[in-house]
Amino acid sequence: MPTAHGDAARGLPRPSTMSQDIDCEGLLNEIVALLDDAKAEDVVQIDLAGKSSIADYMVVASGRSDRHVGAIADQIHKRLKEIKYSTVRVEGQPANDWVLIDVGDIIVHVFCPEVREFYNLEKMWTADHIGGESTH
């Protein structure tokens, strides 16, 4: 479980002083650290700049089972609420084979391995564009 001391080590203010004005990279680092703390596997960060206007970053990770995926999503949601980041929406529970956590500028996808392999979001979002501008 992240602590205020861990926040300081990551360069984040203590939860009681944090609000939604945290910068996007700081929030991305916090989310990746939370995924690591929750033992998520195969975490991939995708920079969406110039690819889409839906978000600045996408993070894709796997849990070992649907129960693990749900626990990872719950842990991230709870921690973001603790640091006063209130515009978090979670989709995909209680099935937990694919949970999407929309944090505004960052979208987090947590998958069961077989579902992640089937949808292969990393390949879709990291492929070079053919024909220039994106219409996403």
Image (cartoon, rainbow, N blue to C red):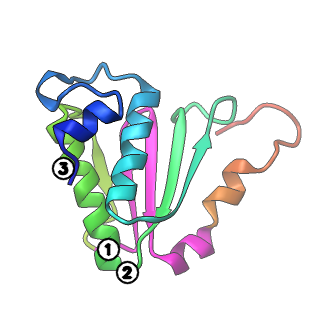
Secondary structure of the residue carrying tag 2 is loop
Give the residue at mark 1. Answer: 68
What residue lies at 30% left-to-right and 59% top-to-bottom? 73
Secondary structure of the residue carrying tag 1 is helix
Secondary structure of the residue carrying tag 3 is helix
Give yes or no for contact between labels 1 and 2 (Cβ–Cβ under 8 Å).
yes
Query: Is the residue 41 above or below the residue 46 in the image?
Result: below
CA distance separating discs 1 and 2: 5 Å
Which x, y percent locates residue 82?
15, 39
> Magenta stretch containing residue 118, yes or no?
yes
Which x, y percent locates residue 129?
82, 42
Give whichever of 122, 36 is nearer the camera.
Answer: 36
What residue lies at 25% left-to-right and 71% top-to-bottom? 94
Which x, y percent locates residue 93?
28, 66
The quarter of the picture where residue 135 lies is top right
Magenta part of the protein: which range? 95-119
CA distance separating discs 2 and 3: 20 Å
Give the residue at mark 2. Answer: 65
> What kind of residue is marked 2?
Ser
Give the residue at mark 3. Answer: 78
Q: Is residue 40 left or right of residue 71?
A: right
On residue 33, which mark appears? none
> What kind of residue is marked 1?
His
Which x, y percent locates residue 74?
23, 59
> Magenta stretch containing residue 114, yes or no?
yes
Q: Is residue 74 left or right of residue 26?
A: left
Image quadrant containing the N terminus:
bottom left
